[in-house]
Structure formats: structure tokens, C-alpha cells
Amino acid sequence: MVAAQIAGRGLRERRVLATLAAIPRHWFVPVTLADAAHDDAPLPVGHGQTISQPYMVALMTAALAPRRADRVLEIGTGSGYQTAILAHLVRRVYTVERIPELARGAARRLAALGLANVEYRVGDGTLGWPEAAPFDAILVTAAAPDIPEPLAAQLAPGGRIAVPVGDLALQQLLVGVRGPGGLQVRAAGGCRFVPLIGRHAFPEGF
């Protein structure tokens, strides 16, 4: 999976590649889909949510330029696959999921992998985690109509953020860096994610 679908498409960050090779993706999908776990495609994980395709996980992770000392906020825990990737790469991960059943399942999987550097919260991810801010990086695993302002405000100086932005039909992965003049944003390519539900994104039932 890593050689053909990720490195083979030009992604060269060695720490990211090694981490994806080390995390068993089949642990994070339903048993009935285990045979498809290493396909380069998103897969359903229940409650209308998906696990992102491996290449997109690698691309978003690399876009954050994760460092070992970083504290990272993840919005959208899902099955916990992206959470596990981040936890391997940084000092601490704070992850927010609005669906309690998904949050509990992710916590069990990461505990089984021995990843103890993760804090979990159930709630509106568009509000971030103010009392734990500022963060060195923020990753959003669902599509928002724009970069939620509370998340941008919780970045440390020099902090990085990656957010799929758009509607259900057309999205761009936006990567921002917080500089002295505000957030400097670039587009990193097209993508497709489920909608981010919350006060600063799409409403429930969108």
C-alpha cells in the first residue's frame, strides 16, 4: 500500500511513510471490509462516516509537517486511523468527535496499539479545544465551507492547519500557516470528504 499508492505517487516524507507502514489499517475498518482495507479508497466506518483513502491521509499528514515535540488538534476522530498516524509522529494529540460511539471505538483501538498520548473529546469540533490551545498543528478530517475561525484562532504562531474546504460536490484541501499577518493559505489539491457538522461549518442534516 505504502510503496504503490503513496510513495509511488510522489510523497517522500520518510517519517510519514514509515508510520503508515507501521499502523494496521485493517484494524480501523469493519471486519466485513478488512479485505479492502489497503485499497487506495475511502471506506465506510458507520454512522455515515468514512476512513479516508491512504494517500489522502499521507498527504494531509505531510502537509502539517509534524514534529516530535508538536501538540496537534484533530477534528473528526472517526475510526481513529488518522489519530493513530498523528500519535506516532507527535508528542500529544487532542481529538474531537461528535459521535460518541466512534470516539469510544477509536479509543479502544489506540489503546490496543499502546498509543497513550491521545486526549479524546465528544462534541462540536468546529469549536476546537480552547483550554488546550494553542496548537502547533490542526487537522480537520471533514469538509467545511471555510476554515472555521475558532480553529484558526487556536493555532500557535507558525502553526499549521489542513482543512478540506468546499461543498459536497467540490472541495480543495487548504493548508494554512499562522504568520505575523494572519493565516497564509495555499491550495494542495482536490479532495472529497463527508461534511463537517457544527456551529462554524454545516448544520446537522446537511
Image (cartoon, grey):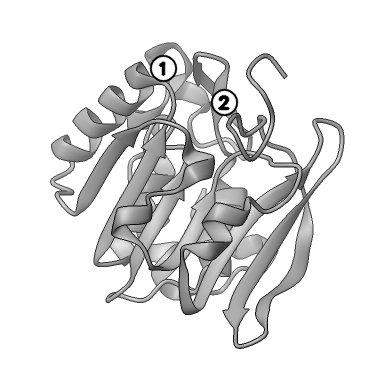
Viewer can see residue 3 = no
Counting from the top left corner in percent of width and height, residue 60 is at 58, 58
Is residue 175 shown left or right of residue 20? right
**For the residue carrying disc 2, how many other residues have a C-alpha within 10 Å: few (<14), some (14-19), or many (20+)?**
some
Residue at mark 1: 30
Counting from the top left corner in percent of width and height, residue 79 is at 40, 30
Query: Would you place residue 129 above or below residue 72 in this image?
Result: above
Q: Nearer the viewer, residue 56 or 126?
A: 126
Residue drawn at x 52%, y 68% is: 64
Report helix, strand or loop for mark 1.
loop
Query: Would you place residue 110 above or below residue 123 in this image?
Result: below
Residue drawn at x 32%, y 30% is: 27
Counting from the top left corner in percent of width and height, residue 78 is at 44, 31
Specify the quadrant of the image occupied by residue 166.
Answer: top right
Viewer can see residue 146 = yes
Specify the quadrant of the image occupied by residue 87.
Answer: bottom left
Query: How many numbered callouts?
Result: 2
Residue at mark 2: 43
